[in-house]
Amino acid sequence: MPDSPPQASPSASRALAASSLGLLNTVFGHGAFRGAQQEIIAHVAGGGDALVLMPTGGGKSLCYQLPALLRDGTALVISPLIALMQDQVSALTQLGVRAAFLNSTLDGGAAYAVERALRGGELDLLYVAPERLMLPRMLELLAQSKLALFAIDEAHCVSQWGHDFRRDYLQLSVLHERFPDVPRIALTATADPQTRQEIVERLALNDARVFVSSFDRPNIRYTIVDKRDGRAQLLRFIRDEHANEAGIVYCLSRRKVEETAAWLSAHGVRAVPYHAGMDAGTRAAHQASFQREDGIVVVATIAFGMGIDKPDVRFVAHLDLPKSIEGYYQETGRAGRDGAPADAWMAYGLGDVVQQRRMIEQSEASEAFKRVSRVKLDALLGLCETAGCRRVRLLDYFGEASEASLNCGNCDNCLEPPQTWDATEAVRKALSCIYRTGQRFGAVHLIDVLRGRRNERVAEWGHDRLSVFGIGGDLDDATWRNVFRQLVVLGYARPDHAAYGALQLTEASRPVLRGEQRVAARRGAASKAGARKTKKAASTGGLAISGADAELLDRLKAWRLARAQEQSVPAFVIFHDSTLAAIATARPQTVEALAGISGMGARKLERYGAMLLELLRQ
């Protein structure tokens, strides 16, 4: 393939644009493209390579699905996510697109039938895992087939410095070597500038056109609260903001996943656990219920969600601190894929900081990897501790310039600006307490000493006789926890991981102790967030639904659930909530009117139109 594909003539470009817009409407049921979609589709359909960075829910899939329909042959989609393959194939099949997948869930006969269809040119798209793609038999099969393009999804997996490195992705440059005339499109929702460069180098995309969409997800409200009683805070958040709505709760350990799911269930939340240590049958059943039922909350380790295409996840909550902003962005991005209001909520405390730093220091990784991990963790801690707009901090990390004074109006700091205070005296007391107690104790014991609690442990060590005993009685426990957390974040103290998190002074603390440096700190984050949009608007794609329209929407959802159960597919594969909400408010009475609803492609109109019109007439 030449370095730069020949430019299409103006007339050919117009014809391609008309064809892509026509397919968008007739196949996918949408009347217009979003953002740079049309430009990306035209470039790839014309034979060009591309690297596409677009946020989750921004419409990445269309950027390769439409070129697959515009070009001759089969588009090969490389994805590490088996569940996502299956859901996307189900959704495409509903639209009348000839799609299939090859992965470990297929038996020999089914896999052979897919391979025969590929050789015979009977598929528009074929989804495969990178492990299978690299098998000599698979590469030989591709050599015998007519290929339209290669789409490399989750392209950040190629980065060894990223949050989700997959070794099999390192071999994908072979596609360019073996099939130089087949265009390639690499796509990801999560890549800082360093990771982007690594994608280009490792996938040999040096001549590819790079499309970078905004990383902003304006429908997601970001909230980070001081962790006091994480589970109780989580329950209050779910009850107050998202009762009976789908959500994901992330925990760091399998044990915490199990305990949190059981605790939520005991308090009336329909919660199920999900982690790699569970038996495969139970894990699959929990994932299926989350996909196919309304109002299920999954409590999981971070691996969950990578293959989830569910559009109506209304919240993602973290009970433990992620490892990096990339991980945080990837995980929170699973909320609100339908564009309706959603929440990214996290409870965060000193224990999280100590735990993440201990994991880095005690890992067997190289010193270079540890150094990068520390930098990434510090960037995340900066996001947690900022008194400014969290969205600005998040976008700046991904290299998206923004006004430093911007008020996004949809994060906790913008909705309820935190106060800052001169914490110099409190910080000096805390540092003195660490020193006077021998740098052998964690924050809980140090707070007891500062607040003058003459309990058994304080008395046993004789710390009730120290000069620092009781000098912090003017501040409550929550404020002291905040002070100690910021000591660690600011680098004035560090946890000694060999001594179970005991805090020790650093060289940076000297100017503060000597009174040569002042310290400003933010007051603890509020435990509640700002004003919410109405519940019904949040669950129907932003449309305000009430009265008879809401009753009709419930009937439409019940009808959709029945169709989904008949076909053993998730309900959103039949229709998204936003499409049903539009039907409920517009109440179309003819096929032509129904065809004008967004999300109603020709195949779905043919398949479900008569049933919907009959339901509406009732």
Image: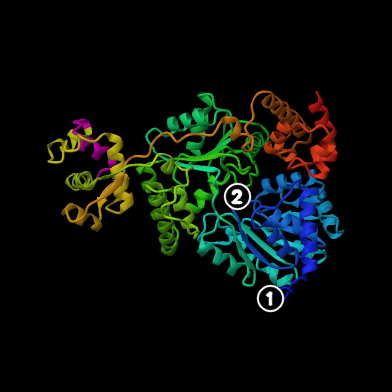
Q: Report the span colored magenta.
A: 440-456
Furthest toward the bottom, the residue is 2
- Pick whichever of labels 1 and 2 is earlier in the sequence: 1
Residue 454 as seen in the image, left or right of residue 166: left
Residue 261 seen in render: yes
Residue at the (29%, 49%) spot, across then down? 487
- Tell me residue 311's x, y (percent): 64, 41
For mark 2, does the 10 Å Cα neighbourhood hold few (<14), some (14 to 19), or many (20 or more) residues? many
Residue at the (64%, 65%) spot, across then down? 171
Number of on-image labels: 2
As drawn, the label of residue 337 is: none
Kindly identify which residue carries mark 1: 3
Of residue 136 and residue 81, the one placed in the foreground of this image is: 81
- Tell me residue 251's x, y (percent): 49, 40
Amino acid on which the number 1 mark rests in the picture: Asp
Residue 68 as seen in the image, left or right of residue 283: right
As drawn, the label of residue 56 is: 2
Q: Secondary structure at mark 1?
A: loop
